[in-house]
Image: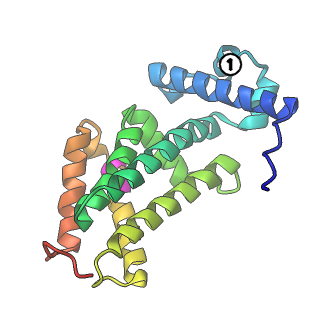
Amino acid sequence: MPQSAQPIGRRERNKRDKLERIIAAARELFDANGVDAVTTQQIADKADIGTGTLFLYAKSKSELLLLVQNSGYVAALEEGRAAAERTIGVVEAVLAIIRPVVECNRSHVENGRTYLRELVFGDPEEPHHREALMLTLKTEAAVAAVLCRDKRIGPDDAATLAQIISAIMFLGMATTINAHRTVDEIIAEIAHRVRVMLPGEPDVLPT
């Protein structure tokens, strides 16, 4: 008989509760005011914790932004993976993965662009930065798995193409010229570039 899961202790429950409150407070304040206008003291007050406790979960406001955005990114990636499984056609399935990620990033445009800057220039030793990098790798892995549906694309090429597609998505979300474009417009731009990379997709993929 499998052993039943061990109950979560009070200390762990308290930690999870504080983390959830921090994420909720930071997300609400960031969405309402933008990252630059929010202080860590405001986040601590809204989460009903001390600033010392806050810094146990994130050492800076930048890390708090990564924490908030990462939590949304996890859900977006899962949504995209599920949508891709229901989607026929390689390009369409790739776009099914990408769309929720773009929507997550663009829920607040400037916060999303700041998140991408932190991803590039932030400290990779910080835990939430590492998590953001891991989410990028997981997204590339999901895209590569979809590309491998096309038997003409081997695993190595699929991994390389997934990295290129990830870069296309990143630029589409981060570039200043796209700051006022809608999600649909950005997805259309990404779709065009992906289709140029993957020409001649057959109507019925070889098995």
Relative side of 133 to 180, left or right? right
* Quadrant that contains the N terminus: bottom right
| Mark 1: amino acid | Ala
The reply to whether residue 99 is visible in this rendering is yes
Our reading of the magenta stretch's main secondary structure is helix
Give the answer, above or below, for where 93 lies relative to 7. Answer: below
Which residue matches tag 1?
47
Residue name at image x 82 percent, y 35 percent? 12
* Quadrant that contains the C terminus: bottom left
The reply to whether residue 122 is visible in this rendering is no
Colouring used for the render: rainbow
Q: Position of residue 13 (x, y in %)?
A: 79, 30
Furthest residue to the front?
Answer: 1
When asked about the image quadrant of residue 130, the answer is bottom right
Q: Position of residue 198 (x, y in %)?
A: 22, 73
Q: Secondary structure at mark 1?
A: helix
Residue name at image x 40 percent, y 31 percent? 108
Residue name at image x 45 percent, y 59 percent? 139
Residue name at image x 21 percent, y 76 percent? 205
The segment highlighted magenta reads 169-173
In front of the other: 84 or 99: 84
